[in-house]
Image: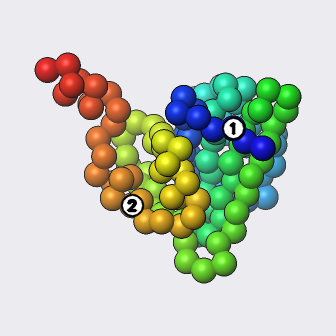
Amino acid sequence: MIALNRRTKIFVSKEPTDMRASYDSLFSKVKSVLNQDPHSGHLFLFINSGRTSCKCLYYDGTGLVIISKRMDKGTFSKINPMFRGEIVLTEAEFGLFFEGANLEKRFIESPPERVIKHQLLQ
């Protein structure tokens, strides 16, 4: 069982991922592509090029867990690879994404987190 909470970040890989990838290759992608610590307890989301399948890598404190889903109909929301900065979903956004909701506007129009923080400080 995955225990997500408000502190759990869901990092999204902007690069399409081969869904044959398993623990070791996803672990490596978390480190090299997302520049994150795979043992952090955060969830890492990978999507194939056709957006019909996704895999999530998660460390639960005792080992690595992979969750995968293949859509019967339709596709997962499009991720904008040109979006500056990392794409981090909230638990609610991840739930919507995983169910197939269209979050495309969120990925295309949302400014990077550092821009939001800068605007709040002014």
> Residue placed at 29% from the left, 41% from the top?
111
Residue drawn at x 81%, y 37% is: 64
Image point (63%, 38%), residue name: 4
The quarter in which the N terminus is drawn is top right
Residue furthest toward the right? Answer: 62
The answer to whether residue 14 of the structure is visible from this angle is: no
Label 2 CA crowd tier, 10 Å (few <14, some 14–19, many 20+): some
Front residue of this view, candidates 54 and 4: 4
Q: How many labels does the image show?
A: 2
Q: In the depicted view, which residue is nearer to us: 59 or 14?
A: 59
Confirm whether residue 114 shows in the render: yes
**Extreme residue in the bottom direction:** 73
Q: Evaluate if marks 1 and 2 touch, with contact meaning CB atoms under 8 Å apart.
A: no
Asked whether 95 or 63 is in front, the reply is: 95
Query: Which numbered circle lies on residue 57?
Result: none
Q: Identify whether 32 is placed above or below 51.
A: above
Q: Which colour scheme is used?
A: rainbow
Q: Which residue is drawn at 72% across and 42% down?
A: 2
Task: Give coordinates of residue 116: x percent, y percent.
Answer: 27, 31
Q: Mark 2 points at which residue?
A: 104
Q: In this view, does 42 lie above or below 78?
A: above
Nearer the observer, 52 or 7:
7
Which tag, 1 or 2, sits closer to the chain's start?
A: 1
Residue 98 rendering spot, x and y as whole percentages: 58, 59
Q: Mark 2 is on which residue type?
A: Glu
Q: Position of residue 39 (x, y in %)?
A: 72, 26
**Which amino acid type is shown beneath numbered disc 1?**
Ala
Image height of 78 relative to 45, above or below = below
Q: Quadrant of residue 72?
A: bottom right
Left or right of residue 98: residue 108: left
Determine whether, in the image, residue 114 is placed left or right of residue 37.
left
Residue annotated with mark 1: 3
